[in-house]
Amino acid sequence: MSEILKGKNAVVTGAGRGIGREIALALAEEGANIVVNDLGVTLAGAEPTSTPADETVAEIKKKGVNATVNYNDVSTFSSAEAIIKSCVDNFGKIDILVNVAGVLRDRMMYNMAPEEWDLVMKVHLYGTFNTCRHAAALMREQRGGHIINIASRAALGISAGNANYSAAKGGIISFTRCIAKDLGRYGITANAVMPTGWTRMTSSIPEDKLRTLAVTYYGLDEKVANTLPVDELGKKVYGDPGDAGKLIAYLASDAAANINGQLFFCGMGQIQHYPDASIPDKTIYTSAGRWTIEEVVRTFPGAIGKALVNPAPPQPPKEKPA
């Protein structure tokens, strides 16, 4: 543990399971105090339970780091305010916000009910706005903070049957790039990351669709894609859900103070920078199979970071008229 985030306070939404849980653990491993927010609902957004969030908090505390649980709903503006407030109430201020919370209501667009569209938009896109809005107001006052919003390669239109999810994630990318310009002058960064991992969410992909994607998008040999057991194929295609944690810890640190308004993919031992929402312009690889924070800090600035332009560098406060 490098403790690159020692003394920092973070909110991670959707931190009870999957990639959100792994991100919370990665931030904790680097010394951050964590508010673990999760409703504990099913993928469809039903049957809430406190168990997932409670278990993540317990795991973080084993690492000797402070953590507190929060069960509020990101999709409601006032409830999202309570999530951010819990960080201030428990730890004094908020330095980091990572928006991961999400649900799925996959269906072909011509069969999609308005309620299925609305729910996914409410949780992903509205939820990201809601927490960012409340956190940004506090970060602006303290002139510093880091926001990392979780997007998805689904926003690139790689598959059918999830128009609501893809649109929401595309909106998160655009939203993040816009607020980076709104907030950068106050020393606040906002970046988006498209992580990958074989999780509860990706394992819900129908088997035939997974096998097709493995060949057509991920380039697996057709014979391999059609013969591997589903879980083994899923892990081969999507990788470990913890792969993105160290990049996000880096983006949440002062070492990345000038990385702002950017879109990255992270997983399978790769970090890719996307100058737009279509193709990456640079890729770096880890030789160890999974990134460490030390390797990200050592490799990222010279390989990807040196070419990045902050669209809104920090500006000194304006002097008030006498």
Image: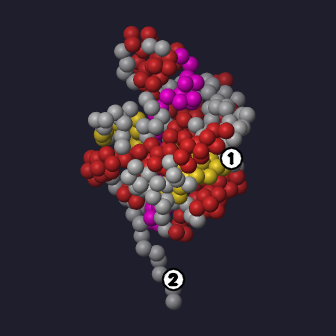
Q: Disc 2 designates what residue? A: 320
Q: Are discs 2 and 1 less than 8 Å apart at CB? A: no
Q: Nearer the viewer, residue 134 or 163?
A: 134
Q: Is residue 287 visible?
A: yes
167 sits to left or right of 186 = right
Q: Residue at x 55, y 43 (%)?
A: 59
Q: Which residues are magenta?
A: 181-207
Furthest residue in direction left, as rendered: 302
* Sequence order check, earlier mark of 2 and 1: 1
Q: How far apart in space, not on screen, are marks 2 and 1 (Cα)?
A: 41 Å
Is residue 119 magenta-colored? no
Foreground tag (2 vs 1): 1
Quarter of the image where one finds residue 269: top left
Picture layout, residue 18 above or below residue 192: above
On the image, the x and y values in percent for residue 103 come to: 63, 35
In the image, residue 187 lies in the stretch drawn in magenta: yes
Within 10 Å of disc 1 (Cα), the crowding (few <14, some 14-19, many 20+) is many
Q: Which mark is residue 71?
A: 1
Judge left or right: residue 313 versus residue 36: left
Whether residue 157 can be seen here: no
